[in-house]
Amino acid sequence: MRTKSLIASAAAVAALFLSTACGGGDNPTVGGIGSGAGADTGTDGGPHEGTLDDPTKNGGANGNAPKDGTAFQKLPKAGTMAAAARFINGYTPCDPVSPSPKNGGPSEGPDTKFGPSFSVTETGYCGRRSVTTIVLIKDPKAFQTAFKAETDAKKGSGNPNQGIVVGQDFAMGSESSDAMSALLKPEAGLLMLNCHPDFNPPSGFRKEPALVKGCVLTDYYQD
């Protein structure tokens, strides 16, 4: 079912993140960005990028996540768009990543309009049959505050079981509910930011404090 992607905008939010590709530098080839003609086979995304086989390399995805921190502090941390896309591609197709939607997809809409309050520094798009949107976040508390403000503006409308999938410094939303569900599995380590006042997951699902009062981090999602 087509999900209303990214960031709690006018429609319901749904939130963001396997083919073979090349990692950077001397990294072995892992599920990453790009494949086939035109794939990026050069260097990695920068000094803060990890790889799927070694996510802590250079402090990349998961590299700065303490084992004994809060739920938010334990979330993966990417550092670059390349690292975020490679991480996502390990659980749901996300290659290659592009600064604009592929296949003539919409260049405007709820997933592409972020005000300054969201502290988004970069936006990328990936996916094959459906579009997945990734954003890098400079200030996670500012992002969560803006997300809650948009949720509050809906005054309780919308699906209470939807939100946006987040890491420490990136977030993702997708047209595919399967893509989002895949990233909430324990092995992925991401959680969904949910600020809906009526959110009440079944017993056994996580409901951890977020950085902003009135929001939680959860592994429960229903389209």
Image: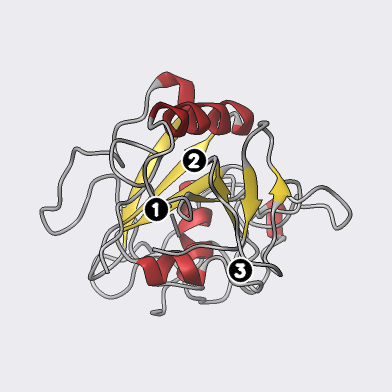
Q: Secondary structure at mark 2?
A: strand
Give the foreground label among 1 and 2.
Answer: 1
The residue that appears at 42% across and 30% down in the rendered structure is: 150
Upstream in the sequence, badge 2 or badge 3? Answer: 2
Q: Secondary structure at mark 1?
A: loop
Outermost right residue: 68
The residue that appears at 19% across and 56% down in the rendered structure is: 102
Q: Is residue 189 above or below residue 200?
A: below
| Circles 1, 3 touching at the beta carbon (< 8 Å) | no
3D distance between C-alphas at marks 1 and 2: 17 Å
Is residue 180 toward the left or the right of residue 140 in the image?
A: left
| Circles 2, 3 touching at the beta carbon (< 8 Å) | no
Q: Residues within 10 Å of mark 1 (few under 14, many from 20)?
A: many
**Nearer-the-camera pick, 189 or 163:** 163
Q: Amino acid at mark 1?
A: Ala
Q: Is residue 70 above or below residue 31?
A: above
Q: Amino acid at mark 2?
A: Leu
The quarter of the picture where the C terminus appears is bottom left
The residue that appears at 50% across and 73% down in the rendered structure is: 91
Residue 137 seen in this snapshot: yes
Q: Which residue is mark 2?
A: 136
- x, y percentage for residue 113? 30, 32
Upstream in the sequence, badge 1 or badge 2? Answer: 1
**Nearer-the-camera pick, 111 or 51:** 111
- x, y percentage for residue 191? 61, 56
- x, y percentage for residue 116? 42, 20
Residue 119 seen in this snapshot: no
Is residue 23 toward the left or the right of residue 174 in the image?
A: right
Q: Which residue is mark 3?
A: 188
Q: Residues within 10 Å of mark 3 (few under 14, many from 20)?
A: some
What number is the disc on residue 14?
A: 1
Is residue 142 toward the left or the right of residue 133 in the image?
A: right
